Image (cartoon, rainbow, N blue to C red):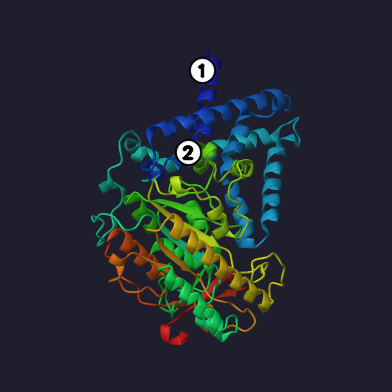
């Protein structure tokens, strides 16, 4: 009798332990995006995995005296797979493939550790205790965390109330969406100098610049002179766009780690002012990333996937995004010929995969990070493939001219397919010469914008942060105020393994 009770308790404990990642995942932010039917998909997927794990244990590991609890623990630890990979990739600076290899090696060593000294099976005692402590600490955290399912379970079973989704102080979100704005495109052209600075550095001549400006004017786009980035690093610029404000708020100098900024903050948190405003106004946020910052699905961040995997994309990939199962989405993308995050020609990819019917049926904020004219310089001025040395300025010149050509193509495409879109095309920072540092050129950015006539009274934005504020105010009638301009230059301090930022005013950059 006692043995039967013990066995039932074990089954209950193993099952609860196995479903622990789901309990941890159901925090307040995720619950607010849920519909009740989503739970069913999670339960089905986890039940299949649980059954598969049990079969592996019965037919493979049981004869080696493995403890089933160990396999359940191993499954739980898989939900830290991408975080561990990112630790090697971002903090230590190892390449992506080497980071994945090291991460897999750690998990394999952990998986096969019980084979060591399995007669006495000392590891069995260790893993039973370790698993129990891990479970108790994780479960205790659910009771301590005010955002967990335990405190917010009611939100799963009721329709979302807009008044409870978000609370922005001093921001008017009651106005209707601007009827003259269909979608919002925010395009980052990485490391693209302003036209004026490009002329100073002999990237372009005056005749070429005049031709560009004439084309923009003819197609209802406005080029904004004297525009500057707020940071000279992509990580901080893109983080500040999500925040609608400076990501850093210190008077003079400060330090930061790459693991605390973009793209990591987009992967590990949905609590960003821009995303919350879009959510409140029923806009969907689409991230079109690249090899440096690929899109990773969450319940508030959408990636471009084919129609056959949309259900998996929406419901499951956000849950499994931190596990090795995430890489199966890459395989599905290849099978269904989806966008390739590793290809830096994002503007071209977007056009090739555009569906007018799909795109115009819902409000979208499309965030495109075009990884050019940044290194590697691998395009001629006519966008033909050619490898230049990364430090070859001639490569930058050709890459810059290629991007201008791609922007022209994108402008024509948008005007033909989404003519009422609000479009911002700008650089995250300017040209950075690591040998001859010059903040005049690293801060000067290309800045092109298209907006409806009823937004002409808004002040022209001349920085990254003020540009996203302009887009939000124009599209939604909000009253966000422009931020006073500051530019932060970063430098790496090897002694502390941190980045130091130095602040400059607009007068320093002219």
Mark 1 Cα shell of 10 Å, populated few (<14), some (14-19), many (≥20) = few
The label shown at residue 5 is 1
Residue 71 shows up from this direction? yes
The label shown at residue 490 is none
Quarter of the view holding residue 418:
bottom left
Which x, y percent locates residue 360? 40, 49
Q: Earlier in the sequence, mark 2 or mark 1?
A: 1
Numbered disc 1: secondary structure: helix
Q: Residue at x 33, y 64 (%)?
A: 452
The label shown at residue 315 is 2
Q: Please tell me which residue lies in front, 114 or 105.
A: 105
Q: Please tell me which residue lies in front, 338 or 8.
A: 338
Numbered disc 2: secondary structure: helix
Which x, y percent locates residue 70? 62, 34
Give the vertical position of 355 relative to 205 (above or below). above
Which x, y percent locates residue 256? 51, 68
Quarter of the view holding residue 453:
bottom left
């Amino acid at each position: 009798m006692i043995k039967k009770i013990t066995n039932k308790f074990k089954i209950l404990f193993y099952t609860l332990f196995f479903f622990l990642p789901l309990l941890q995942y159901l925090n307040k932010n995720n619950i607010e995006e849920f519909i009740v039917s989503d739970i069913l998909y999670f339960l089905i997927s986890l039940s299949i995995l649980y059954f598969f794990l049990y079969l592996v244990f019965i037919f493979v590991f049981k004869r080696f005296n493995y403890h089933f609890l160990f396999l359940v623990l191993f499954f739980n630890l898989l939900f830290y797979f991408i975080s561990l990979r990112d630790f090697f990739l971002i903090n230590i600076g190892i390449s992506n493939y080497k980071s994945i290899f090291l991460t897999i090696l750690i998990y394999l060593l952990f998986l096969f550790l019980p084979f060591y000294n399995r007669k006495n099976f000392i590891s069995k005692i260790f893993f039973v205790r370790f698993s129990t402590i891990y479970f108790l600490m994780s479960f205790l955290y659910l009771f301590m965390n005010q955002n967990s399912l335990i405190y917010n379970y009611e939100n799963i079973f009721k329709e979302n109330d807009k008044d409870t989704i978000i609370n922005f102080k001093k921001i008017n979100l009651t106005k209707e969406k601007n009827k003259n704005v269909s979608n919002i495109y925010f395009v980052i052209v990485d490391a693209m100098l302003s036209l004026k600075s490009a002329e100073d550095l002999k990237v372009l001549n005056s005749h070429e610049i005049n031709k560009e400006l004439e084309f923009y004017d003819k197609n209802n786009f406005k080029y904004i002179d004297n525009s500057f980035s707020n940071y000279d690093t992509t990580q901080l610029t893109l983080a500040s766009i999500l925040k609608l404000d400076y990501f850093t708020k210190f008077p003079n100098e400060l330090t930061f780690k790459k693991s605390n900024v973009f793209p990591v903050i987009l992967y590990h948190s949905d609590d960003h002012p821009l995303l919350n405003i879009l959510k409140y106004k029923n806009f969907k946020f689409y991230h079109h990333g690249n090899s440096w910052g690929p899109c990773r699905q969450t319940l508030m961040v959408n990636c471009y996937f084919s129609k056959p995997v949309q259900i998996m994309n929406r419901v499951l990939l956000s849950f499994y995004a931190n596990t090795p199962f995430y890489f199966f989405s890459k395989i599905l993308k290849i099978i269904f010929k989806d966008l390739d995050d590793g290809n830096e020609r994002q503007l071209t990819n977007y056009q090739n995969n555009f569906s007018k019917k799909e795109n115009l049926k819902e409000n979208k904020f499309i965030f495109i990070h075009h990884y050019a004219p940044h290194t590697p310089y691998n395009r001629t001025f006519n966008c033909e493939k050619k490898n230049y040395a990364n430090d070859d300025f001639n490569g930058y010149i050709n890459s810059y001219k290629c991007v201008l050509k791609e922007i022209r193509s994108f402008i024509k495409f948008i005007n033909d397919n989404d003519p009422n879109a609000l479009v911002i095309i700008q650089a995250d920072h300017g040209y950075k010469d690591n040998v001859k540092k010059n903040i005049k050129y690293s801060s000067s950015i290309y800045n092109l914008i298209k907006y409806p006539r009823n937004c002409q009274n808004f002040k022209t934005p001349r920085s990254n942060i003020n540009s996203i504020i302009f887009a939000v105010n124009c599209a939604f009638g909000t009253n966000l105020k422009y931020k006073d301009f500051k530019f932060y230059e970063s430098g790496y301090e090897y002694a502390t393994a941190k980045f130091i930022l130095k602040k400059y005013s607009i007068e320093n950059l002219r």
